[in-house]
């Protein structure tokens, strides 16, 4: 029989569960941030506000209907299923009413043809008066 030494500090090897949790955090935190920002934008939009208002109203009526069913002694699971169907129908109708209708493709208007300007023939005498201040009548050659 041999004597085994048992004692001293046990050394931890690897990263353990903390390393796995750190990995999960580094992987999922950007996704959660992105989804959070998108959700906030959706809730602040006109559509989101309308849907949340409809959900609020439906939650109140569903609560009252379920309370009435409980007082009457009706089956609450069946009542719950009916209320879920009503919520789906109401929210679907509200979202459908908020979706803008597609605009019909407009045919672009044809531009009217530009009128062509009829230009008059310009004779040299008129051209000399208007644009040029010299005349070729009094020219002199350098070589003669």
Image (tube, rainbow, N blue to C red):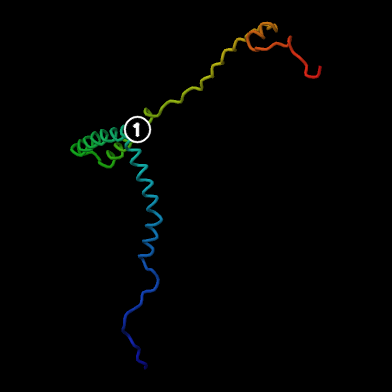
Residue plotted at (59% across, 12% down) = 114
Residue extending farthest left = 71
Q: What element carries label 1?
A: helix
Q: Mark 1 points at which residue?
A: 47
The residue lying at 25 percent from left, 41 percent from top is 76
Choose top left, top right, bottom left or bottom right for residue 16: bottom left
**Where is residue 71 drawn, in percent x and y?**
18, 38
Instruction: Tell me the residue at 51%/22% (across/down).
Output: 105
**Count of marks overlaid on the render:** 1
The crowd level at tag 1 (other Cα within 10 Å; few <14, some 14-19, many 20+) is some
Q: Front-most of 32 and 134?
A: 134
Farthest residue in the bottom direction? 1
Most distant residue in the right direction: 144
Toward which corner of the image does residue 18 lie, by quadrant? bottom left
Q: Which of 144 and 87 is in front in this view?
A: 144
Q: Position of residue 8 (x, y in %)?
A: 31, 83
Which of the 4 quarters of the picture holds residue 80? top left
**Horizontal and vertical percent for residue 94?**
34, 30
* Residue nearest the viewer, comparing 20 with 80: 20
Q: Against 31, is 48 above or below? A: above
Query: For this view, does 112 lie left or right of residue 3?
Result: right
- Work out whether 43 lies above or below 14: above
Location of the N terminus (image quadrant): bottom left
User: Is residue 93 placed above or below 122 in the rendered structure?
Assistant: below
Q: Split into 4 quadrants, where in the image is the C terminus? A: top right
């Amino acid at each position: 029989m041999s004597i085994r030494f048992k004692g001293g500090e046990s050394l931890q090897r690897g990263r353990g569960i903390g390393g796995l949790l750190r990995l999960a955090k580094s992987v999922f935190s950007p996704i959660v941030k992105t989804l959070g920002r998108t959700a906030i934008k959706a809730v602040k939009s006109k559509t989101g506000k309308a849907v949340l208002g409809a959900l609020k109203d439906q939650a109140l009526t569903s609560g009252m209907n379920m309370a009435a069913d409980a007082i009457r002694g009706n089956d609450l699971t069946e009542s719950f299923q009916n209320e879920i169907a009503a919520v789906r129908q109401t929210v679907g109708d509200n979202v459908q009413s908020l979706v803008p209708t597609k605009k019909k493709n407009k045919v672009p208007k044809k531009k009217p043809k530009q009128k062509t300007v009829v230009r008059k023939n310009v004779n040299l005498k008129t051209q000399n008066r208007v644009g040029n201040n010299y005349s070729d009548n009094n020219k002199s050659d350098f070589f003669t």
